[in-house]
Image (cartoon, rainbow, N blue to C red):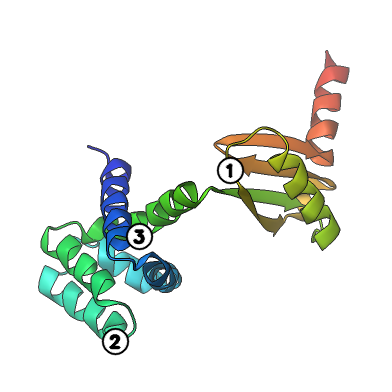
Amino acid sequence: MSSKRIASRYAKSLIDLAVEQDKLPTILVDFEQLKEAFKNRDLYLMARSPIIKVDQKMDVFKALFAGKVDALTLTFIEVLTHKGRENILPEVVKEFFNQYNKKMGILSVKMTTAVPADEAILASAKAKILSSGISATQVDIRNIVNPDILGGFQLEYDGKVYDASVATHLRNLKQNLRK
């Protein structure tokens, strides 16, 4: 079974348990902390390392998160670690957010522009996406600045890419002129 599928199952189990215990908002905050923590390359590599012993990894996790996250989150990390699945913890964190967004009807959108998009453009994009017939009730747009696209924008959501960038139009025009 792929690590993504395993991570997805663990994330779903945690979300179900958090809902059952009425702790989903708390666990969401905890997972924001975990997401930030795993941006640290050393922690990420330690979690994924087959060389470092399970007890040592658990000691690190407890030192970092004990008293800072809910007991359910810490117990979840312990279960993963003792089952030898701590190497997929960063993937579980990612899957947790994907499943949380799906459960809450939130569509996560990545909008790439050449310059930072102002609030009016972001609001307009949200409105157009919501009116396009998607099942989400809320749109969360993350604006990424990439000057290489020259102008226009690229939208990525639901596994699809909508490319209305100047760079792509110029590349397509160049290919058509060569034919």
Residue at the image point whose x is 12% and y is 58% from the top: 83
- Residue sitting nearer the eye, 142 or 144: 142
Secondary structure of the residue carrying numbered label 2 = loop
Quadrant in which residue 88 is drawn = bottom left
The alpha-carbon separation of the residues under discs 2 and 1 comes to 35 Å
Residue 67 - label? 2
Answer with left or right where residue 87 lies relative to residue 162.
left
Q: Nearer the viewer, mark 2 or mark 3?
A: 2
Three-letter amino acid code at the position of disc 1? Ala
Residue 90 - label? 3
Answer with left or right where residue 142 lies relative to residue 54.
right
In the image, farthest residue toward the top: 179
Three-letter amino acid code at the position of disc 2? Gly
Sooner in the amino-acid sequence: mark 2 or mark 3: 2
Q: Give coordinates of residue 111: x percent, y percent.
A: 70, 50
For the C terminus, give its image quadrant.
Answer: top right
Sooner in the amino-acid sequence: mark 1 or mark 3: 3
Q: Which residue is mark 1?
A: 136
The alpha-carbon separation of the residues under discs 1 and 3 comes to 26 Å
Residue 11 - label? none
Q: Nearer the viewer, mark 2 or mark 1?
A: 1
Three-letter amino acid code at the position of disc 3? Pro
Residue at the image point whose x is 63% and y is 42% from the top: 156
- Residue sitting nearer the eye, 134 or 177: 134
User: Dot 1: few (<14), some (14–19), or many (≥20) neighbours within 10 Å?
Assistant: some
Q: Give coordinates of residue 50: x percent, y percent.
A: 18, 60
For the N terminus, give its image quadrant.
Answer: top left
- Residue sitting nearer the eye, 164 or 15: 15
Sooner in the amino-acid sequence: mark 2 or mark 1: 2
| Cβ–Cβ under 8 Å for marks 2 and 1 | no
Residue 53 in view, yes or no: no
Answer with left or right where residue 62 lies relative to residue 117.
left
